[in-house]
Amino acid sequence: MITSEEPQTPSEYQRFSFTYRFDGADWSIEVPALSLEEARERVRVLGFARYDGDQEKRRKPTPNGYGSSTWFRSVMRSAFSGQNA
């Protein structure tokens, strides 16, 4: 488990790209993390993600696009699109 004594800021995160095969096609996601080890751990726990609703209806734009946590949720939701909870 990744732990930290001090909270990290979004600017300290790197984006790591992961590709997987589904239904005969390759799909990629970017995972924000402080290290490759942490990114791999985040990918491992995706099976425990919960469905929170339709992202298109919940997104709130900001001047720089979407906030980093919203961005991450968007990536995770799109990875699970079409699945019902």
Image: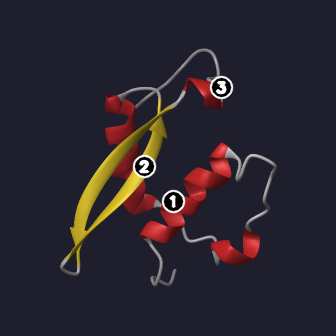
Residue 13 position within the rendered picture, expressed as x and y whole percent measured from the top left: 53, 29
Amino acid beneath label 1: Val
Q: Earlier in the sequence, mark 2 or mark 3?
A: 3
Look at 46% across and 84% down and name the residue there: 82
Q: Nearer the viewer, residue 1 or 71?
A: 71
Snapshot colouring: secondary structure
Mark seen at residue 65: none
Say left or right for 14 vs 64: left
Q: Is residue 72 left or right of residue 56?
A: left
Drawn side of residue 46 relative to residue 8, left or right = left
The residue shown at (70%, 53%) is 66
Q: Residues within 10 Å of mark 3 (few under 14, many from 20)?
A: few
Circle 2 is placed at which residue position? Answer: 30
Q: Is the Cβ of the residue at disc 2 closer than 8 Å to that at disc 1?
A: yes
Q: Tell me if residue 64 comes above or below residue 83 in the rendering.
A: above
- Which amino acid does the dot numbered 3 rest on? Thr
The number of numbered badges drawn on the structure is 3
Tag 2 and tag 3, C-beta contact below 8 Å: no
Q: Earlier in the sequence, mark 3 or mark 1?
A: 3
Q: Secondary structure at mark 1?
A: helix
Instruction: For mark 2, give the secondary structure.
Output: strand
Q: Which residue is mark 1?
A: 75
Q: Position of residue 83 (x, y in %)?
A: 45, 82
From the image, tell me which residue sits under label 3. Answer: 9
Up the image or down, 60 lies above or below 14; here it is below
Per the model, the C-alpha gap separating discs 3 and 1 is 19 Å
